[in-house]
Amino acid sequence: MTTEYQVRLDRDACDGVFACLVRDDRFVEASDGLATIDGGDGSQHERTVDGTELVTFTDEQLTAAEQAARACPVDAIEVLPEEADE
């Protein structure tokens, strides 16, 4: 079953610890020294005015995203899963 979910990254809350990077390789270090999400192909990536990134994925990497969120010491990452229609 394919899972659709969103990953929300509050870049204003990010402090550059990068615990997320070792749990989910879609998180990368941006040029400003904070984490960002590499949406890759097939994702919908949106950056809001308030510095939050919201990326929608339809893949099998939900567990990695949840691990990255749990590892973030400042709770800057939130994962919102939904079951996608097949």
Image (spheres, grey):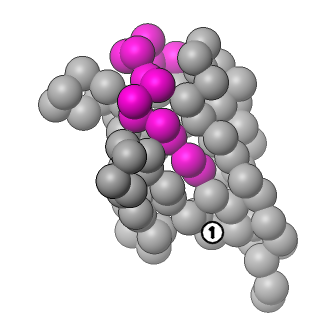
Residue in the foreground of this view, choosing between 40 and 52: 52
**Residue drawn at (77%, 58%) of the image:** 81
The residue that mark 1 highlights is 58
Q: Is residue 11 above or below residue 43?
A: above
Give the image location of residue 5, x and y in percent: 68, 61
Residue 78 seen in the current view: yes
Q: Please, which residue is most extreme toward the bottom here?
A: 86
Q: Is residue 55 above or below residue 38?
A: below
Residue 11 belongs to the span the image colors magenta: yes
Residue in the foreground of this view, choosing between 19 and 9: 9
Give the image location of residue 54, x and y in percent: 49, 56
Question: Residue 47 is drawn in which quadrant?
Answer: bottom left
Give the dominant element type of the magenta stretch: helix, strand or loop. Answer: loop
Q: Quadrant of the C terminus?
A: bottom right
**Image side of residue 43 versus residue 6, left or right:** left
Query: What's under tag 1, amino acid-wise?
Result: Thr
Count of numbered marks: 1
Q: Is residue 8 above or below residue 15?
A: below
Residue in the foreground of this view, choosing between 45 and 23: 45
**Residue drawn at (70%, 68%) of the image:** 4
Q: Quadrant of the N terminus?
A: bottom right
Q: Helix or strand or loop: what does disc 1 sit on?
A: strand
Residue 65 belongs to the span the image colors magenta: no
**Residue drawn at (46%, 25%) of the image:** 13
Q: Please, which residue is most extreme toward the front here?
A: 50
Q: Which segment is the magenta one?
A: 7-19
**Residue drawn at (43%, 50%) of the image:** 53
Give the image location of residue 38, x and y in percent: 37, 49
